[in-house]
Image: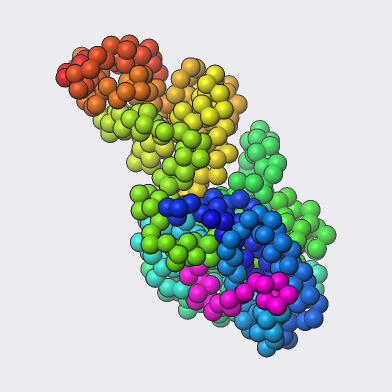
Amino acid sequence: MRVAAIDVGSNSIHMLVAQVEPDGRFRILDRAKEMVRLGSRTLLDGSLSPEAMAKGLRALSAFKTLADRQGVQRIRAVATSAVREAVNGGEFVRRVEVETGLRIKVIPGREEARLIFLGVKHAIDLRGEPTVIVDAGGGSVELILVDGGEPVELVSLKIGLARVSERFLVKEKPDAKAIGALERHFASELGPVLARFRARGARRVVGTSGTLVNLIAMADAAPEKSKPKDKEKARAKDKEDVAEHLEGLTVKPEAMARIRRRLEKSDRAQRLQIKGIDAKRVDLVLAGAVLADHVLTALGAREMVACTYALREGVLLDHVARHRRGIEEQQRYPDPRHRSVARLIRHLGEPNRHGQQVATLALQLFDQLRDSLALGGAARDWLEFAALLHDVGHHISHKNHHRHSYYLITNGELLGFRRDEIEIIAQVARYHRKSVPKPSDGSYGLLSKRERQIVRALAALLRVADGLDRSHYGVIRNVAVARRDRRVELKLTTAGDDAALEVAEARERTALLEELLGEVVEFRLVG
């Protein structure tokens, strides 16, 4: 079944189209966006202008036509601040239904926050430390305090970026007095809320909505003066298109403060020259920067994470949940990262029994050798995901499939991961066979020293584990590590099958592990 979710916001109207599978899984097929500015003057005047309604109707009519052409069977549309506050919002909703056939549900602020949480939870792992989700729309700002993976508090405030820009940032280049007034307004509205959130220990912020995500990209793209020139060049090359691969992009509060100061000193034309800015958001980006900086400072936050999944994805997820008894995939993989990896493997048509077996053996080796290889707990997950994905390159070609695996992992839209994590996982998968990592290798050479150490260590374990399942029949059931006389003995348990091929292949792949351990690696069959 194909489903479309439409978000009628104060600034933009968005639509996504997804293919929903019988077990509740979905795959996004298309996205569309139109900057309508329904909230332009509406949020201050209290009614939708005839021009704004006409633009909104045209956009929704076009979206309905696009959905019909793509075979969409169900459309769920919601409207937020501008429509719910306008005295003629009901008239607009009726006109949309009469002229396009679309039925729009006007949702309250708390429901908007709940749906935003659903969207973010699908893309970002929220089960650990307390986290604050901030979604800055044109008319309202939603804040969600998440603890233990569940929403503890849902807040919606009428301090949206279009609303405050029209009130405080009237001039093209606002002066310090105007910005100070905006800062005090945010402090008054947000103070009690952020104080409660800080008391819960929330030091991680997830930013959603187009303007906040764009700000995170801008902050990440802006080079620091202290960076060596060669690193600046590598970074600039990597940031050629900062609009891509934004999911999970993370910046420090200092980076956001720097981009805020730069925006404050710039007029409209100068802002358009800042690397990474979305020209359509140039009129709202300063208010967004003041808001983001204020929230990060008030919380004493350590980072801000970009999430492109928000309200419309939440609308889709809510629709699927309401129309099915359960989503099998989410039951099997409660962690969005495992779910995302499984989805990529399935999308590529890989049965992956071999990947699961290699992951089992690789993790057994990791647990027994992690101290010797100076590996932390996070590296265990990276090794597991690299093992599960190491052979997906066969989808492109059997020849050099390890290189194709790297490409598919880095471009596979894996959710729940930071970009540096995806790079490490892809690098480990890339080096599961053939050559070992070398500083002269392009993408490997751009990693930090510590990241290169981790990739080498995990690749060493993956190479051996992959060799131990050379026949793809799961002959080796368990690996136990014993050490004596500067030798590492791997005791291999089988079910009685001939393991000569596996042992021979694994021996061919021990060189990197021996180099890192400084010991000889031997094999012994014990079952």
Relative depth, front residue between 179 and 454: 454
In this orientation, does residue 461 appear? no
Task: Answer left or right for 236 relative to 413.
Answer: right
* Occupied quadrant, residue 91: bottom right
In this orientation, does residue 247 appear? yes
Q: What color scheme is it?
A: rainbow
Q: Which residue appears farthest toward the right when viewing the image?
A: 269
Relative image position of residue 115 (x, y in whole percent): 50, 68
Task: Answer left or right for 326 relative to 135.
Answer: left
Relative depth, front residue between 171 and 326: 326
Give the quadrant of the C terminus: top left
Q: Is residue 113 magenta?
A: yes
For image coordinates 59% across by 65% down, the residue present is 75
Q: Note whether 283 is above or below 188 in the view shown.
A: above
Relative image position of residue 422 (x, y in whole percent): 50, 40
Magenta stretch in the rendered image: 96-115
For image coordinates 62% across by 77% down, the residue present is 81
- Please tell me how many numbered marks the rendered image carries: 0
* Occupied quadrant, residue 179: bottom right
Relative image position of residue 447 (x, y in whole percent): 54, 33
Task: Answer left or right for 370 relative to 53.
Answer: left
Q: Which residue appears farthest toward the bottom when viewing the image?
A: 87
Task: Answer left or right for 219 relative to 380.
Answer: right
Q: Note whether 346 is above or below 464 in the view shown.
A: below
* Occupied quadrant, residue 487: top left
For image coordinates 64% across by 46% down, the residue present is 244
For image coordinates 65% across by 35% down, the residue present is 234
Q: Note whether 369 is above or below 121 in the view shown.
A: above
Q: Which residue appears farthest toward the left when viewing the image?
A: 527
Relative image position of residue 524 (x, y in whole percent): 21, 15
Label the magenta part by its dominant secondary structure: helix
Q: Is residue 437 magenta?
A: no
